Image (cartoon, rainbow, N blue to C red):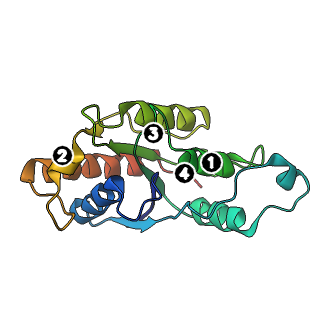
Amino acid sequence: MTKKIALIVGSLRKDSLNRKFANALVEVAPAELQFEFVDIGDLPLYNQDLDDANTPPAAWTAFRDKLRNVDGVVFATPEYNRGTPGALKNAIDVGSRPWGKSIWAANPVGVISASIGAVGGFAANMQVRQSMVTLNAPVMAGPEVYIGTGQNLLGEDGKVNNDKTREVLAGWAAAFAKWVEANGRKG
C-alpha cells in the first residue's frame, strides 16, 4: 500500500546539500513511499497571538493541512551552529500549534542529516528528534544517518557519486517504510 510521505528540508538554499541527499533518498526508496517535498521557506514566524485570535496566516494553514494528510514525515536537516536551523524549528513550532491540534502527534517521523563537517549534523538531528518525541511523534530510532563531509559524496551533477552512500540511504528508506507501516496513525 502506498504511503504519502512529507519530506521537509531544513535548509532554504536552492543548492542545499541536504536537498541533494533528500533527492537521493527519494531515488532509492521503496516504491510504496510516495514523497512530496514540503517547502518551509514562506512560513511566517510563529506567533501564538495569531492562533489565539483565530487569524493564522494562510501559509500556516496550508502547511498544517498538508501535513495532516500524510502517513509520515522525513526531515533532512543541516546543522547551524550546533543546532537546528531556524526555519526548520519554526516549521516544527507552526505544526505543533494551536495547543491540542499538533500535526505531528502520532505521525511517524524519520530524520537524516548531512553537513560539510565530519560530524554530519549530529546535533541538529538529535534536536529534531527531541522536539518530535516531545510532540508525541513516533521517531524512528535507527538506523541513523549522519552524512559527514557530504560535499565529497556528490558528483559535479549534485548526485550521490558512490554506491555505499546509496546503499546507506536505501537501507534507511526501507527501514522507514517498515516504521511507517508499524507506527502509522490508526483511524
- Residue 44, located in which quarter of the rendered image? bottom right
Query: What residue is shown with label 2?
Result: 168
Where residue 95 sits in the image (x, y, percent)?
A: 65, 51
Residue to which mark 1 is pinned = 90
> How far is the residue under mark 1 from the one under mark 2?
29 Å
Q: Amino acid at mark 4?
A: Arg
Q: Earlier in the sequence, mark 4 or mark 2?
A: 2
Which residue is pictured at 21% across the width and 61% down the height?
Answer: 28
Q: List x then y, in percent, for residue 108.
A: 47, 47
Q: Answer whether residue 104 is visible to the viewer in this image.
A: no
Q: CA distance from mark 3 to mark 2?
A: 24 Å
Residue designated by label 4: 185
The span from disc 4 to disc 1 (Cα, nearest Å) is: 24 Å
Q: Nearer the viewer, mark 4 or mark 2?
A: 2
Q: Amino acid at mark 2?
A: Val
The image position of residue 137, as x and y in percent, is: 54, 41
Q: Residue at x 66, y 68 (%)?
A: 62
Circle 4 SS class = loop
Please report contact status of discs 4 and 1: CB closer than 8 Å, yes or no.
Answer: no
Labelled disc at residue 169: none
Q: Position of residue 136 (x, y in %)?
A: 59, 37
Read off the residue under disc 3.
80
Q: Please, what secondary structure does the residue beneath circle 1 have?
A: helix
| Closer to the eye: label 1 or 2 | 1
Tell which tag, 4 or 1, sits nearer the viewer: 1
Distance CA(mark 3)–CA(mark 1): 14 Å
Question: Which residue of the protein is positioned furthest toward the right in this rendering?
Answer: 53
Q: Is residue 181 left or right of residue 20?
A: right
Label 1 crowd (10 A; few <14 / some 14-19 / many >=20): some
Q: Do the CB atoms of the residues marked 3 and 1 lie less than 8 Å apart?
A: no
